[in-house]
């Protein structure tokens, strides 16, 4: 069990470090490039901002589908991350807003499936008394790598604005190596659902456990605020009528 935990932790820290690059790229630079370099209309910016929300909505069906294939969950997650990588590398080759939006929404939907799939890995590979500590390191590594990446790529865009496609090359390679890490990570298959179980059956815990229900409601409100605020913040900082700060300052 100890070897399993250590191998999972090392590979997952590597994967989450790469996820730090991806999350900053999607949350900051995707909208920034659409506004500043592609002059995107409001509709396209809205779709780009909603990519993760689309993916989170599909997550229950993704997890349920994993039980059908009878394969290790990390292998399925690795395939999904490979799709994310392919979409990002394809995005680096486009010059217009329509394919830019399509490829990036596919990439965001793919990346947003990871939390739901990794829950299965954490529950089976980590001991209950170490699970929270191990997962917290993921957030620390992702945050540190994300901060470094966003600062230096902001500097790069200020001096080489027309070369923004290198961002998507970098993100595509990060997604590729994250896919490799997932294939190397040990895991079991997702157990099939009980006959007659409903995909929304877990929602009954909202009423059965009132504390959980209140916590979930608060988490949803905070999440809604973050999802709405991040793209609006980028629009305000770099869009027409905004404060017009540099990419590094963003």
Image: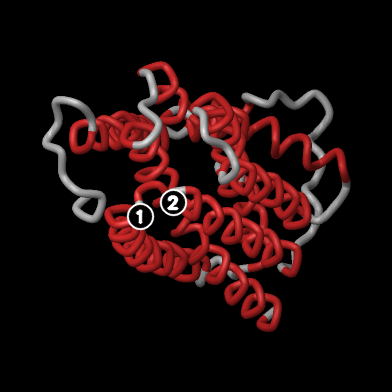
Question: Residue at the location (80% across, 46% down)?
Answer: 191
Q: Secondary structure at mark 2?
A: helix
Q: Is residue 238 left or right of residue 11?
A: left
Image quarter of residue 58: top right
- Image coordinates of residue 13 in percent, x first then y, are 53, 70
Q: Is residue 140 left or right of residue 79?
A: left
Question: Residue at the location (71% across, 68% down)?
Answer: 185
**What is the tally of numbered marks visible in this picture?**
2
The residue labelled by disc 1 is: 160
Q: Is residue 245 left or right of residue 150?
A: left
> Where 189 sits versus 135, above or below?
above
> Where 225 sits versus 136, above or below?
above
From the viewer's side, name the closer residue of 174 and 59: 174
The residue labelled by disc 2 is: 163
Question: Residue at the location (45% across, 29% down)?
Answer: 48
- Image coordinates of residue 177 in percent, x first then y, are 64, 64
Location of the N terminus (image quadrant): bottom right
Image quarter of residue 66: top right
Tell me how far mark 1 sits from mark 2, CA to CA.
Answer: 6 Å
Neighbor class of circle 1 (other Cα within 10 Å; few <14, some 14-19, many 20+) is few
Neighbor class of circle 2 (other Cα within 10 Å; few <14, some 14-19, many 20+) is few
Tell me the tag on residue 88: none
- Image coordinates of residue 52 in percent, x first then y, are 49, 35
Q: Do the numbered discs 1 and 2 sit on residues whose CB atoms are within 8 Å?
A: yes
- Image coordinates of residue 139 in percent, x first then y, are 41, 62
Q: Secondary structure at mark 1?
A: loop
From the viewer's side, name the closer residue of 17 and 31: 31
From the viewer's side, name the closer residue of 79 and 161: 161
């Amino acid at each position: 069990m100890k070897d399993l935990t250590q191998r999972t932790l090392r590979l997952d820290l590597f994967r989450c470090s790469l996820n730090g690059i991806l999350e900053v790229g999607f949350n900051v630079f995707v909208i920034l490039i659409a506004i500043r370099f592609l002059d995107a209309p409001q509709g396209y910016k809205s779709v780009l901002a909603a990519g993760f929300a689309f993916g989170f909505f599909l997550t229950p069906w993704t997890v349920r589908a994993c039980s059908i294939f009878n394969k290790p969950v990390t292998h399925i997650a690795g395939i999904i991350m490979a799709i994310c990588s392919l979409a990002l590398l394809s995005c680096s080759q486009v010059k217009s807003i329509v394919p830019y939006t399509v490829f990036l929404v596919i990439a965001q939907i793919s990346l947003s499936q990871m939390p739901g799939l990794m829950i299965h890995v954490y529950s089976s590979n980590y001991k209950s008394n170490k699970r929270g500590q191990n997962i917290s390191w993921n957030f620390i590594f992702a945050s540190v790598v994300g901060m470094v990446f966003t600062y230096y790529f902001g500097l790069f865009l200020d001096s080489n604005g027309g070369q923004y496609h290198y961002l998507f090359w970098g993100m595509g390679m990060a997604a590729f190596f994250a896919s490799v890490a997932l294939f190397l990570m040990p895991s079991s298959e997702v157990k099939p659902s009980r006959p007659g179980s409903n995909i929304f059956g877990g929602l009954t815990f909202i009423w059965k456990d009132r504390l959980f229900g209140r916590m979930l409601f608060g988490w949803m409100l905070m999440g809604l605020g973050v999802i709405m605020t991040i793209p609006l913040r980028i629009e305000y900082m770099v869009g027409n009528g905004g404060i017009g700060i540099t990419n590094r300052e963003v």
